[in-house]
Amino acid sequence: MSAASNEATAAVNERQLPVGHGEGRAQSVLAVPRAPAIEEAEETVDLPGVRLFMHAFVDRLGNAPLRSSRFTIEPGCGTGEDRHAVHEIWFVAKGQLDVCYDGEWYRVEAGQALFFEPWRPHFTRNAGDESAQIFSVWWA
C-alpha cells in the first residue's frame, strides 16, 4: 500500500475533536480513531410501543457466530411470546421489566442480564414509568 493510500485511509478512520474550551482559550485539534461501530436499522414490528433495531453483521462480521439487536419498550407496553432454536441473552440497559420465562414471572431492572434456553417461551412488559431499552444477543 502506498504512503498516500495509508494517509487517505487514516484520514477516513479519524475524526477531529477540539481540545480545550472556554472563552479566550485557543483550541487545538486532536485526531482520534473512529469507533468500529456496528450499524443498526429499525425493523417494523406490529407491537404498540415496541421498536426493534437490528444490528448489521456485514464485512468482517458476516461470519460472526452470533447476532444482536436493540429494542425499546414504552411504559405499559410489551412483547409477544417468543420461542426459538437459539440461545439468547438480554442485557437491560434502561428501565424496569416484568419478564415471563418458561411460565415464571421475574422483575428485572437496568443493569441486569437474562439468559434464555432454546425453545423456552419468553416475553416481557415494561413495568416502569420510563422507556426500557434492552440489548439482545443470540447464537445457535
Image (spheres, rainbow, N blue to C red):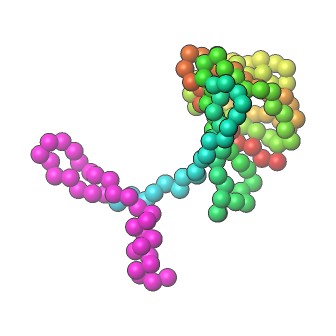
In this view of the protein, can residue 36 be seen by the observer?
yes
In x, y percent, where is residue 86?
Answer: 82, 42
Bounds of the magenta segment: 1-30
Vertical arrangement, residue 6 with respect to residue 57, above or below: below
Q: At 64% across and 52% down in the image, what residue appears?
A: 56
Residue 61 sits in quarter: bottom right
Is residue 79 shown in magenta? no
Q: Position of residue 16 (x, y in %)?
A: 33, 57
Q: Would residue 109 be seen by someone viewing this image from the given angle?
A: no
Q: Locate residue 131, reporting x and y percent.
A: 57, 24
Membership of 4 in magenta stretch? yes
Q: Residue furthest bottom?
A: 2
Q: Nearer the viewer, residue 96 or 47?
A: 47
In the displayed structure image, the side of residue 10 where residue 121 appears, left or right: right
Which residue corresponds to the image point at 54% horizontal and 52% vertical from the top-left? 37
Q: Is residue 22 above or below residue 37?
A: above
